[in-house]
Image (tube, rainbow, N blue to C red):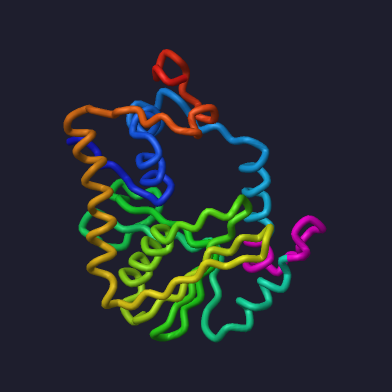
Amino acid sequence: MTKPLAHSYSALKLFDNCPRQYMLQKITREVKASFGEASIYGSRIHEQLEARIKDGVELPEESKYYEHLIEAFASLPGELIAEKELVLTAKLEPTTWWAEDAWLRSKLDVLVINGHDAVVADWKTGKRRPDSFQMELFAIQVFKHYPEVERVRTALIWLKTSELDQYLYTRLDAPALWDKFMSKVNRIEQAKDKDQWLPKPSGLCPWCPATPSHCEFK
């Protein structure tokens, strides 16, 4: 039996950007994602903020400015969790990150659970490019994993500019959000069934790890 594809926000975004690149990285695994200085910096900042929330580790000089954000989340009522892994099977049942039946994986930078209310936040270290779909996906994950939650307030936090993109979702929104998610999944499944992974040339091509032997646009 062929193992079903596993999905995540980053994988869905990769397919939207270029089905060919998605195929090369997620299906055939002929190429690996490349990580530049900005990506390495972003990972480092995420690790520092995680350590601050989880273990109370003092923020180093390069991220000290974000202490007020940590304090703001810590002041909220409820349980504060950093880097929360939420994973569902294809039957929409909770499972673990590396489980064989893991079908949808999400990692939430910040999660606060307080009865019927939840807060979700994602740290962003790059240029501001709002994308509500990421927050929609995180919201429906929370609704599945925390049946008592009725409202999820979400925020993309752009650390360099101190800007916020905030969204509010209720449990009544969940069916429409699942439909949107499944429409993206179905496009990937159709491409897989047809083995048709068309390239999508764009301004992102220079940073694609594919080589000319993989894609005519390299």
Is residue 35 located in the magenta-colored stretch of the structure? no
- Counting from the top left corner in percent of width and height, residue 212 is at 45, 15
| Residue farthest to the right, as pictured | 61
Q: Which of 27/186 is in front?
A: 186
To which quarter of the image does residue 56 belong? bottom right
Q: Which residue is drawn at 66% across and 71% down?
A: 69
Left or right position of 135 against 188: right
Q: Magenta stretch: give its range.
A: 49-65
Q: Which of 59/10 is in front?
A: 10
Task: Report the predominant secondary structure element of the magenta stretch.
Answer: helix
Q: Which of 52/205 is in front?
A: 205
- For residue 153, above or below residue 136: below
Q: Residue at x 35, y 39 (%)?
A: 15
Q: Which residue is drawn at 52% across and 83% down?
A: 78
Q: Residue at x 45, y 75 (%)?
A: 153
Count numbered badges in the picture.
0
Position of the N terminus by quadrant:
top left
- Counting from the top left corner in percent of width and height, residue 111 is at 50, 70
- For residue 6, above or below residue 195: below
Is residue 57 located in the magenta-colored stretch of the structure? yes
- Counting from the top left corner in percent of width and height, residue 206 is at 53, 27
- Counting from the top left corner in percent of width and height, residue 40 is at 65, 42
To which quarter of the image does residue 157 belong? bottom right
